[in-house]
Image (cartoon, grey):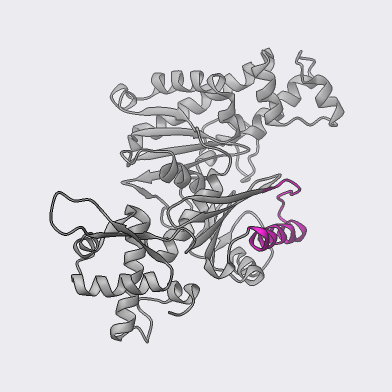
Amino acid sequence: MVSLQEFFNQSDQSSNGKGVVHKNNIIKRNIIAHMALKGECTLADLAKELNISIPTVTKLVEELVADHIVTDKGKIETNGGRRPNIFGIKNSAIYFAGIEVNRDHIHCVITGLQNNLITAKRYPDFELEDNDASLEKLCDCIEDFIKTCGVDETKLLGVGVGIAGRVNPNTGRSYKYFTSNPKSLKEIIENRIHHRVLIENDTRAKCYGEYTTGLDGNEKNVIYLNLGRGVAIGIIIDGKLYYGNSGFAGEFGHTPFFDNEIICGCGKKGCLETEVSGIAIENKMAEQIRQGRNTILVDKFNERGGKIHINDIINAAKNDDNLSIELIEEAGEKVGKSIAFLINIFNPQLVIIGGSLSKAGDYIMLPLKSAVNKYSLSLVYNDTKFRITNLDENIGAMGAAMLIRNKIIGL
């Protein structure tokens, strides 16, 4: 077989895509994709699911075993008759990398074909800004991770990169960061690391990571609300991520909910982000301190030259700081009203609250759910479950890895 990268990059519609070899390669990719989703299976299972003959599937699986991609797990017990062999993906056969780019750090993971975490690394010395220095640092971190992660690079099929802001996965271009470069972010990173790259919105990556890792498989309509420095949503409809016409679906934070004069990062006034995002709460805390309000964060505010971080506010709330509790509860009530709008439209089975503000626990969730109950239709509210994310900080990078996996193997 050709190299794994060449094998999976072959187009089904390529000009030389004719003949038995090409058709067999397509079936092989389908076999791998089926095992990635369903796990171990018999030859009879594969033949039935993929609608191909037993002799053909036997021959192709034997070739995948010889190429060290599929492994023979031995015979399984049956109620009688001849015991069939069961086959599955070899644990060390294929890898994907996932990168989550945050404002002050980068999370990197390596996953296997079945979403199993192989290794993870955090790069804390990073600052996300729209400039060449930040872009260079990002590429350096990704390059270093791939070289030091401990897996065979020839088995690494792709790298998914989740980053905040408006992103078009089809063009590989970010419309918030690194916009002055004529090349797309996808092209820039690919030229540095020499691996196939997918650029994805960070909230969608987290949403897909939650969907593939944290759910039981019964939820097919899910909204993931990312309450971090900004506000955005990921949407799962009938088990699929919803992108919209141009790949920009989910920019919920820029919905004009408020009649205020606060200018949002998008340049408009009154956006949801101007009142309920991490930045908004930080700004409100700073203003309250300047006005003389009492809080345990005064000393930290002064030490940092008039700056405060949302994590400081959350920690202060957990230590019974009244002002911090007040600001978080106010944000919870306002975002709950906005979620009522969402669930009236989408009627999801589940709403997951993620992002840094989710760490506030009941301080954010109780006013949020109370407002949703108040402003949504009761039939819709009663049919929707709410929960805070219970997954670790690797989830965005895991989601990005799975999305590049899906693109490459055709899921």
In the picture, measured across the screen, residue 315 lies left or right of residue 330, that is right
Q: Is residue 341 magenta?
A: no
Residue 310 position (above or below residue 57): above
Q: Which residue occupies 67% across, 63% down?
A: 147
Q: Is residue 129 magenta?
A: yes
Magenta span: chief secondary structure: helix
Q: Which quadrant of the rendered structure holds the N terminus?
A: bottom left
Residue 371 visible to the viewer = yes
Residue 82 in the image: state x and y as whole percent. Answer: 16, 59
Q: Which quadrant of the rendered structure holds the C terminus?
A: bottom left
Residue 136 picture quarter: bottom right
Front residue (pair 404, 379): 404
In the picture, measured across the screen, residue 231 lies left or right of residue 338, that is right
Residue 190 in the image: state x and y as whole percent. Answer: 61, 69
Front residue (pair 398, 40): 40
Residue 259 visible to the viewer = no
Residue 193 in the image: state x and y as whole percent. Answer: 64, 68
In the picture, measured across the screen, residue 315 lies left or right of residue 72, that is right
Q: How many marks?
A: 0
Q: Which residue occupies 63% across, 16% down?
A: 326
Residue 251 in the image: state x and y as whole percent. Answer: 51, 45
Front residue (pair 157, 346): 157
Residue 97 picture quarter: bottom right
In the picture, measured across the screen, residue 165 lies left or right of residue 31, that is right
What is the magenta range?
A: 122-149
